Image (cartoon, grey):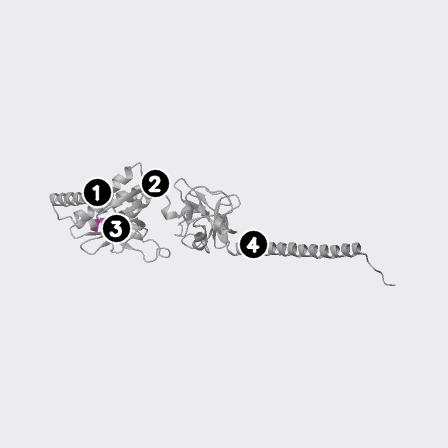
């Protein structure tokens, strides 16, 4: 006999079915919402990972002036917004980075923080002297290390884990010393396309065709006035020895009629080695350098060594004005110095006036 439901039972059953489907729908919506949230989270994580940047970081603390070796650095992926400005450029700049001497012998940092050089497969500890020179002992003989141009030093002290940016380091040849100063010159013949940060040599050419390198591989700064670059003035960062050497070359250029103090540019400074300086200052200038307490012993010794080994170059320069009367030489020097001062005053006035 078929069972029959009274109206209350039918109503209860209908309510149950309705509630079930509502609960089912809510469950489906919750699952869909959670699935969407998970999808968005996974998508965002993939996007974050794909946008990460590779930076170079230090594996140990570094002091100001310390040489950076390849085993002191490692790469680390960080979120793009966390990467310091310039840190990504460091990766390409230091790609396949290796510190070596001029003979290609690699220099590394040991676990105790000291440096060592590997020569013919044998590792030798390096010792740093008071002048900042590194030496090692091989076969009982002290050997001085001549660093290659790709040797970088820290400008400031840096902590372990610090991302490296180019402004934190400098090549060892451009390392700031206590006697480094910015010097402005307006008597040098400049290339027509010279601009700030170009790398140059300063040279002195004599009327007989002799041509000497006064300063080697220097970066220039070209001042601007009214938005335009100066056509006659440049600034160079020089140490005390280089300042006096440059002053001597300027005086020589005034003394010798037909001489030319000029700049020429490196076409690829990153790959080209520095020229060897061949200009030798006068004996008077060398005496000033020898007695000057501001001179660094290392720079002074290098210049005196150059003079002793190539003094014939200085004799050639002196002979270029040997037949000229002293009064005429003095007049030429005075005229050249006056021109320098007037040019400097006019440029300063233009900059101050904003013209």
Secondary-structure class at tag 2: helix
Secondary-structure class at tag 1: helix
Give the labeled residue for mark 3: 228
- Residue found at x 79% / y 56%: 7
Q: CA distance from mark 4 to mark 3?
A: 49 Å
Q: CA distance from mark 2 to mark 3?
A: 40 Å
Q: CA distance from mark 2 to mark 1?
A: 39 Å
Comes first in the chain, label 4 or label 3: 4
Magenta range is 311-316
Q: Nearer the viewer, residue 179 or 321?
A: 179
Q: Confirm or deny contact between disc 2 and disc 4 (CB under 8 A).
A: no
Comes first in the chain, label 4 or label 1: 4
Question: What x and y, as percent, mark residue 236?
Answer: 29, 46
Comes first in the chain, label 2 or label 1: 2
In the rendered structure, the answer to whether residue 209 lies left or right of residue 96 reads: left
Secondary-structure class at tag 4: helix
Give the labeled residue for mark 4: 45
Mark closer to the observer (4, 3): 4
Q: Nearer the viewer, residue 33 or 61?
A: 33
Q: Classify mark 3: residues with Cα within 10 Å, few (<14), some (14-19) or many (20+).
A: few
Q: CA distance from mark 2 to mark 4?
A: 57 Å
Farthest residue in the top direction? 293
Answer with the quarter of the image where residue 193 lies.
bottom left
Mark closer to the observer (2, 3): 3
Q: Which mark is residue 349?
A: 1
Q: Nearer the viewer, residue 46 or 22?
A: 22
Q: Which mark is residue 164?
A: none
Comes first in the chain, label 3 or label 1: 3
Q: CA distance from mark 4 to mark 1?
A: 58 Å
Q: Which mark is residue 297?
A: 2
Question: What x and y, as percent, mark residue 213?
Answer: 27, 52
In the rendered structure, the answer to whether residue 35 lies left or right of residue 285 reads: right
């Amino acid at each position: 006999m078929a069972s029959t439901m009274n109206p209350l039972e039918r109503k209860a059953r209908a309510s149950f079915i309705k509630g079930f489907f509502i609960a089912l729908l809510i469950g489906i919506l919750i699952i869909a919402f959670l699935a969407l949230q998970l999808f968005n989270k996974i998508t965002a994580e993939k996007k974050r990972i794909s946008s990460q940047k590779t930076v170079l970081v230090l594996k140990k603390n570094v002091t100001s002036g310390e040489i950076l070796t390849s085993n002191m650095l490692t790469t680390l992926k960080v979120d793009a917004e966390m990467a310091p400005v310039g840190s990504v450029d460091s990766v390409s700049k230091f790609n396949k980075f290796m510190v070596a001497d001029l003979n290609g012998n690699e220099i590394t940092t040991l676990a105790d923080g000291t440096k060592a050089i590997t020569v013919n497969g044998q590792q030798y500890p390096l010792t740093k002297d008071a002048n900042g020179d590194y030496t090692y002992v091989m076969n009982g003989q002290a050997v001085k290390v001549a660093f290659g141009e790709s040797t970088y030093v820290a400008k400031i002290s840096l902590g372990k884990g610090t991302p490296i940016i180019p402004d934190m380091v400098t090549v060892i040849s451009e390392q700031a010393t206590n006697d480094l100063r910015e010097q402005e010159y307006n008597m040098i013949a400049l290339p027509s396309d010279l601009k700030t940060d170009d790398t140059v040599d300063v040279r002195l050419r004599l009327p007989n065709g002799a041509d000497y390198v006064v300063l080697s591989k220097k970066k220039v700064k070209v001042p601007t006035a009214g938005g335009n670059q100066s056509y006659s003035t440049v600034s160079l960062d020089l140490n005390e020895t280089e300042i006096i050497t440059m002053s001597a070359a300027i005086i020589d250029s005034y003394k010798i009629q037909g001489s030319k103090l000029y700049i020429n540019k490196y076409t690829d400074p990153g790959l080209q080695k520095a020229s060897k300086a061949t200009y030798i200052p006068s004996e008077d200038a060398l005496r000033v350098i020898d007695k000057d307490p501001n001179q660094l012993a290392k720079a002074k010794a290098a210049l005196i060594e150059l003079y002793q080994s190539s003094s014939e170059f200085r004799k050639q320069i002196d002979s270029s004005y040997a037949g000229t009367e002293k009064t005429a030489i003095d007049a030429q020097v005075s005229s050249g110095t006056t021109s320098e001062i007037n040019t400097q005053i006019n440029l300063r006035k233009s900059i101050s006036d904003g013209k």
